[in-house]
Image: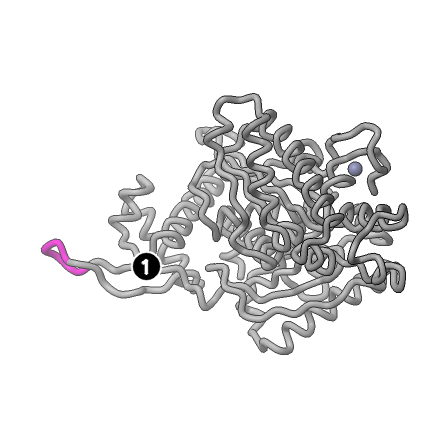
Amino acid sequence: MKSLEHWNTEQVKQHNRSLVLKMIYKNGPISKADISKNTNLTFATIGNITAELLKIKALKVAGYGESNGGRKPVLYEFNWENYYVIALDIGVTKVSAGLVNFKGVIYERYSISMTDFNYQTTFIEKVYKVIDQLLSETKIEISKIAGIGVSAPGPIDEDGSQILSPPNLQGVENVNLKDQLQQRYNLITILEKDANAAALAEQWFGEVNKNENILYIFADQGIGGGMIVDSRTYRGFKNGAGEIGHISIDPDGPRCNCGNFGCLEAVASGLSIITRIKKEIRRGGRSSLTDLYLNDEDALTLETIMEHGENGDELVLKILEETGRYLGIGVTNAINFFAPKMVIFGGQLVELYPEIVQISENIAKSRAFSTSAKDIKFVKSSFGECSGLMGAASIIQQLLFDSPGNTLIKL
Ligand SMILES: [Zn+2]
């Protein structure tokens, strides 16, 4: 970013609008005096910005504060009722769409199964179908929708337009969802890698304190990682950062969907659990899942496997323990390199097997090099299976609050 002294007038305006809007969003109802105290902007500047934002109905007057002798000050609040996001969560097994407001409340949601999508056309049609269904059921005015946020398995191209070639979404390759959705719905659309989006949701709607660097571990069918550094998503060169699922854990380990051997994803993801259980059963390992598997190979879902684990199936328990150990080692590597203040775990595997957070914490804390590792907070995401939708919503929210002049004002 350029230093402040090199900004042109429009950039300064944009920056100030963003400051005022964020202040009102987070602390409203709030008076101009309190905005001024917290932002160091003058009353005149704040007055211009609030007038502009009131005009486009981004703000509303929420009442009047206590008088200090003169007139009672006007209190401003963000106009929640006017801003919704269509959040789209593209997962390995399903696509979901939800209508979410800027407080992170999900009003409606629909899902559609992704079991038979081998061609780009089918994939896009399913995406349209789930959004169309959401729009027709909610009957929301399109003018109240700020944009479409998409959380999808990576890799995603640099400008948030295309899903490139996710190893776990076979058949989906170089799909420019951004252009297609923008054209069809006439709404600003941004794509983000699922783990980055989920990490951003923790910052907007979760318990993360400002400026805390966080590492988000998305342990689902695959494994992804997201990093927030100084309140921003850390992307790396060409959006390539955070691929913790493909760090090598065991050079002689099983082949990963990316083509390498022994990646974290190949030994600690939901899919890897299913693959290993099947392999052990074929080798003659004893398990209460054997009959089920021999009758129908596809019957072994992560949910079924977990149920058998809860009933004490020893093969399942052994594989889950190994999985936790591998995940802990992967997280240790990431901690040694990145030293976050907080590690947040989300995704289907974490939802079905929350113990994996504690197992990872124990391993990371006993193995990490840095002495500060003992103070790192390990937590499970508070959004459960909604973390994808919340993530998708937070992308649009971030965009609008960062550049309200280019986006909000135009609406
Ligand atoms: Zn890999």
Q: Which residue is most to the left?
A: 69
- Secondary element type, mark 1: strand
- What residue is drawn where x is 36% and y is 58%? 51
Residue 165 in sight here:
no
- Residue nearer the viewer, 158 or 41: 158
Q: Quadrant of residue 264?
A: top right
Horizontal side of residue 90 vs 77, given as left or right: right
Q: Quadrant of ligand 1?
A: top right
- What residue is drawn where x is 67% and y is 64%? 96
* Residue at mark 1: 76
- Residue nearer the viewer, 402 or 52: 402
Horizontal side of residue 3 vs 147, given as left or right: left
> How far from the left and from the top, in percent, is residue 194?
66, 49
Q: Is residue 71 magenta?
A: yes
> Label 1 crowding class (10 Å Cα cut-off): few <14, some 14-19, many 20+?
many
Residue 373 in sight here:
yes
> How far from the left and from the top, in percent, is residue 40?
31, 39
User: Image height check: is 37 above or below 248?
Assistant: below
Say how the picture is coloured. Answer: one colour
Q: Is residue 43 magenta?
A: no
- Residue nearer the viewer, 10 or 338: 338
- What residue is drawn where x is 61% and y is 65%? 98
Q: Quadrant of residue 73?
A: bottom left
What type is the residue that disc 1 sits on? Tyr
- What residue is drawn where x is 53% and y is 54%? 397
Please state the extent of the stretch shown in magenta in the rendering: 67-72
